[in-house]
């Protein structure tokens, strides 16, 4: 067993200003294990949009869990409040406890928790606040790793204890419904980024800056980008295997932007394949999205996915995409938004990489992807949270409203 703990002391002041907020305001708390950098703009907009509708939102986070610390993509903001966090590793599994004292003192009408069985504070908050004041957000089931049937059953049991479920994808919502959660108490609330700001950044960047970026990272020939955590389930090794099969000019360079536990194995694989001079591991870079239009294709060969933000960034930038039709990927791309390949097929992936070497093919998919990304507007998601919140409370008073799917409103 390995304990660790940091964060704010338990006696920090209750969040918010009850006098300034007003007696008629509803109070909502989001509790994150850690706040990813890409979530900060969304939460900023969400807080402002909800405040305009009389809903005050506070955001809490714990210390970044050890399992995802290597990604180096945790963000922070002045409105995010830290919770004292402890972590134990027991038989290779992590258990986390974020002290809920500030949340309990906040007088919240609703507390929205991550759908994860390892968050010990979730059970305490359920016991002390009751199910009518607890909702869960998440993927619906575990996509990122293999788990035992018992652990998955515990996740569904925990989800059933909440009053509402916010799912990143329609398949995720369908999963909790299949396990008995009332469909009328669910919302498909797609993950999102500020695509408008991203496109503005892309338009503003100079040719000199792009050239400097390429020169600094030794990018030549054609380029394929993977952007995200370097985790085993992402199947980045398949991308390297496929790239090694493309030997004709111009040389295909693979850019891996992100951190994670697979970095060392991927470096060794590149050397073994003899393509180490064509594989560029950049680590986590917060400015990579600004340079997306310098690259030729985005690749996400995962065997498991939820609703990948990196794919949305690539679509918004007009970058053609190759992806496995898993999790929320198919929901995002549809049948024509990108080239879909079988998750375990190196042959299909290599052939797709060859196809996008054609400028005509790249242009066709780039145009479609930019249009698709507009369906997942940050403003649209933020502004409609207030309406979703009203549906949540009206469910007890006026019957069962139909399930909402925010991205289609």
Image (cartoon, rainbow, N blue to C red):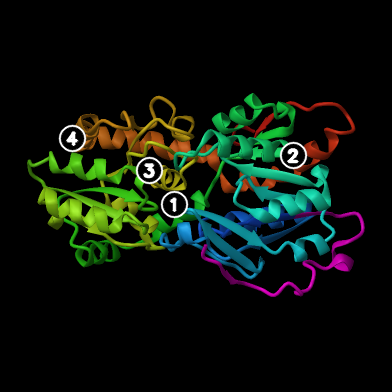
Q: Quadrant of the C terminus?
A: top right
Q: Earlier in the sequence, mark 4 or mark 3?
A: 3
Q: CA distance from mark 4 to mark 3?
A: 24 Å
Residue 402 position in % (x across, y down) = 74, 26
Magenta span main SS: loop
To which quarter of the image does residue 60 belong? bottom right
Mark 4 or 1: in front is 4
How crowded is the residue under tag 2: few (<14 C-alpha within 10 Å), some, or many (20+)? Answer: some
Q: Which residues are magenta?
A: 1-28
Give left or right: position of 304 versus 394: left
Q: Nearer the viewer, residue 116 or 313?
A: 116
Name the disc covering residue 233, or none. 3
To which quarter of the image does residue 52 belong? bottom right
Residue sitting at the far left: 248
How crowded is the residue under tag 4: few (<14 C-alpha within 10 Å), some, or many (20+)? Answer: some
Q: CA distance from mark 4 to mark 1?
A: 27 Å
Q: Give the secondary structure at mark 1.
A: helix
Q: Nearer the viewer, residue 353 or 184?
A: 184
Q: Which residue is mark 4?
A: 354
22 part of magenta stretch: yes
Name the disc covering residue 199, or none. 1
Q: Which residue is mark 2?
A: 161
Q: Give the secondary structure at mark 2.
A: loop
Mark 4 or 3: in front is 3
How crowded is the residue under tag 3: few (<14 C-alpha within 10 Å), some, or many (20+)? Answer: some
Residue 37 position in % (x across, y down) = 51, 60
Tell me, yes or no, whether the two marked residues, 4 and 1, touch with CB atoms within 8 Å: no
Q: Is residue 407 visible?
A: yes
x 89%, y 67%: residue: 19
């Amino acid at each position: 067993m390995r304990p660790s703990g940091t964060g704010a002391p338990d006696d920090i002041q209750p969040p918010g200003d009850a006098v300034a907020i007003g007696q008629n305001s509803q109070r909502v708390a989001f509790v994150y294990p850690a706040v990813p950098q890409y979530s900060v703009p969304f939460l900023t907009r969400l807080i402002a949009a909800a405040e305009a509708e009389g809903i005050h939102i506070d955001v809490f986070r714990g210390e970044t869990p050890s399992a995802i610390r290597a990604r180096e993509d945790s963000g922070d903001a002045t409105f995010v409040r830290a919770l004292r966090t402890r972590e134990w590793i027991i038989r290779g599994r992590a258990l986390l406890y974020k002290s809920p004292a500030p949340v309990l003192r906040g007088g919240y009408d609703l507390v929205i928790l991550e759908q994860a069985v390892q968050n010990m504070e979730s059970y305490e908050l359920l016991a002390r606040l009751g199910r009518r004041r607890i909702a869960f957000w998440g993927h619906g089931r575990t996509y990122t790793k293999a788990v035992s049937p018992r652990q998955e059953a515990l996740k569904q049991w925990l989800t059933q204890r909440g009053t509402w479920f916010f799912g990143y994808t329609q398949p995720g919502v369908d999963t909790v419904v299949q396990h008995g959660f009332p469909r009328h108490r669910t919302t498909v609330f797609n993950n999102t980024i500020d695509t408008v700001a991203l496109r503005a950044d892309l338009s503003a960047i100079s040719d000199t800056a792009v050239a400097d970026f390429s020169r600094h990272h030794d990018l030549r020939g054609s380029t394929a980008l993977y952007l995200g955590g370097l985790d085993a389930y992402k199947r980045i090794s398949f991308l390297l295997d496929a790239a090694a099969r493309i030997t004709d000019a111009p040389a295909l360079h693979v850019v891996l932007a992100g951190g994670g536990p697979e970095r060392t194995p991927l470096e060794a694989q590149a050397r073994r394949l003899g393509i180490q001079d064509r594989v560029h591991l950049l680590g986590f870079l917060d400015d990579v999205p600004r340079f997306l239009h310098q690259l030729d294709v985005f690749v996400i060969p995962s065997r498991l996915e939820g609703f990948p933000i990196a794919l949305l960034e690539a679509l918004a930038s007009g970058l053609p995409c190759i992806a496995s039709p898993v999790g929320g990927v198919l929901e995002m791309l549809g049948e024509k938004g990108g080239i879909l390949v079988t998750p375990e097929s190196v042959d299909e992936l290599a052939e797709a990489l060859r196809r996008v070497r054609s400028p005509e093919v790249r242009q066709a998919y780039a145009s479609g992807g930019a249009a698709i990304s507009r369906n997942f507007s940050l403003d649209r998601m933020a502004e409609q949270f207030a309406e979703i919140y009203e549906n949540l409370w009206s469910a007890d008073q006026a019957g069962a409203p139909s399930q909402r799917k925010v991205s289609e409103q």
